[in-house]
Image (tube, rainbow, N blue to C red):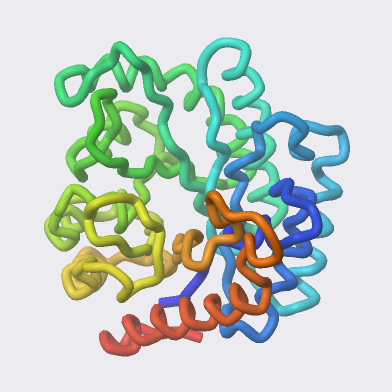
């Protein structure tokens, strides 16, 4: 199994904090880290002043691709925009998401993870069908771009909240069945599941072939830390058994983007932010931790 990590963790260390205009520079920071495979984050693609909303958005992607190619990196996964899916902001979110799908096509990425939209009046757990219907228009509008670029859109599990959001495998499966198109699938977020103390093995086995991608990060089940594996209490044996026995074919993708985060809240002065060299050393630790997990189960792949 190949190890990948999100480049989102390096955006703020770049000369421009804007996710897309700094993506090429962020990629360069992974040189000599051990990583060869990367996850492109479009998380901020619908934010104000995002280059992905400008006429030159394709140039941004092509520059990132050129840097990745030059350094020997390959993109294997992506995270879609965090955006509204209704109203005027939903129209902007749709443009950004369709462009993100097209960018995945340009970068050779098959799987893009998305957060479904949430709505104040749609409550967990009883309003499941209403939730599916509320998301349907936005996600069906993505299908032409998904088909043209051969990109899967994968619904990610969340954590328990008042609003409805798929948390369990059966809920993700139900949403995929409702959308009824072969390019929709599921992504299993390990850290989110651990907050709910879910058994990874049971849930992953229930997802079966719907599972196309994972997000690996750690916490102590109290909050969504997005920390390095082994810094919390996630049961990685349960995770690995599930991935093996379910026949998972995706990558082991880290989303530990808060491991030595750039911004240290409430701090000012010379040491307000984590130095780049510290973060780069942390990235090597991330890779080593992931490699150790996969090696223990004889699954590590260069």
- How many callouts does the rendering have? 0
Farthest residue toward the front?
Answer: 269
* Residue located 41% across and 20% down the image: 136
Q: Is residue 214 above or below residue 184?
A: below
Residue 19, position as x, y percentages in the image: 69, 48
Q: Is residue 167 left or right of residue 6?
A: left
The answer to whether residue 40 of the structure is visible from this angle is yes
The answer to whether residue 173 of the structure is visible from this angle is no
Q: Is residue 147 above or below residue 191?
A: above
Residue 92, position as x, y percentages in the image: 66, 22
Closer to the camera in the image, 256 or 271? 271
* Residue located 63% across and 40% down the image: 44
Residue 12, position as x, y percentages in the image: 67, 56
In the figure, residue 64 lies in which quadrant? bottom right
**Quadrant of image for the N terminus:** bottom left
Q: Is residue 196 left or right of residue 113?
A: left
* Residue located 57% across and 79% down the image: 35
* Residue located 73% across and 46% down the image: 18
In the figure, residue 10 lies in which quadrant? bottom right
Closer to the camera in the image, 230 or 183? 230
Residue 115, position as x, y percentages in the image: 43, 37
In the figure, residue 22 lies in which quadrant? bottom right
Q: Is residue 37 above or below residue 92?
A: below
Q: Is residue 254 left or right of residue 175?
A: right
């Amino acid at each position: 199994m190949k190890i990948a990590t999100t480049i989102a963790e390096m955006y703020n260390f770049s000369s421009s904090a804007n996710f897309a205009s700094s993506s090429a520079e962020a990629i360069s920071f992974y040189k000599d880290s051990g990583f060869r495979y990367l996850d492109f984050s479009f998380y901020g693609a619908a934010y104000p002043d995002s280059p992905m909303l400008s006429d030159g958005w394709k140039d941004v992607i092509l520059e990132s691709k050129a840097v990745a190619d030059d350094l020997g990196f390959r993109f294997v996964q992506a995270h879609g925009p965090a955006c509204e899916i209704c109203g005027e902001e939903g129209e902007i979110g749709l443009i950004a998401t369709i462009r993100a799908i097209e960018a995945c096509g340009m970068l050779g990425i098959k799987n893009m993870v998305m957060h479904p939209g949430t709505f104040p009046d749609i409550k967990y757990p009883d309003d499941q069908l209403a939730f599916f219907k509320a998301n349907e228009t936005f996600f069906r509008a993505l299908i032409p771009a998904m088909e043209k670029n051969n990109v899967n859109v994968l619904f990610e599990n969340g954590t328990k909240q008042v609003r409805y959001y798929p948390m369990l495998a059966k809920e993700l499966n139900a949403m995929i069945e409702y959308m009824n198109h072969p390019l929709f699938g599921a992504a299993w977020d390990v850290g989110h599941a651990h907050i709910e103390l879910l058994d990874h093995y049971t849930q992953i086995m229930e997802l079966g072939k719907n599972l196309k991608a994972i997000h690996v990060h750690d916490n102590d089940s109290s909050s969504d830390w997005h920390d390095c594996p082994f810094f919390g209490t996630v049961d990685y044996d349960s995770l690995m058994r599930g991935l093996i026995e379910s026949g998972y074919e995706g990558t082991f993708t880290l989303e530990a983007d808060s491991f030595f985060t750039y911004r240290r809240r409430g701090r000012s002065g010379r040491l307000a932010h984590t130095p780049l060299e510290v973060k780069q050393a942390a990235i090597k630790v991330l890779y080593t931790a992931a490699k150790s997990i996969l090696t223990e189960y004889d699954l590590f792949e260069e």
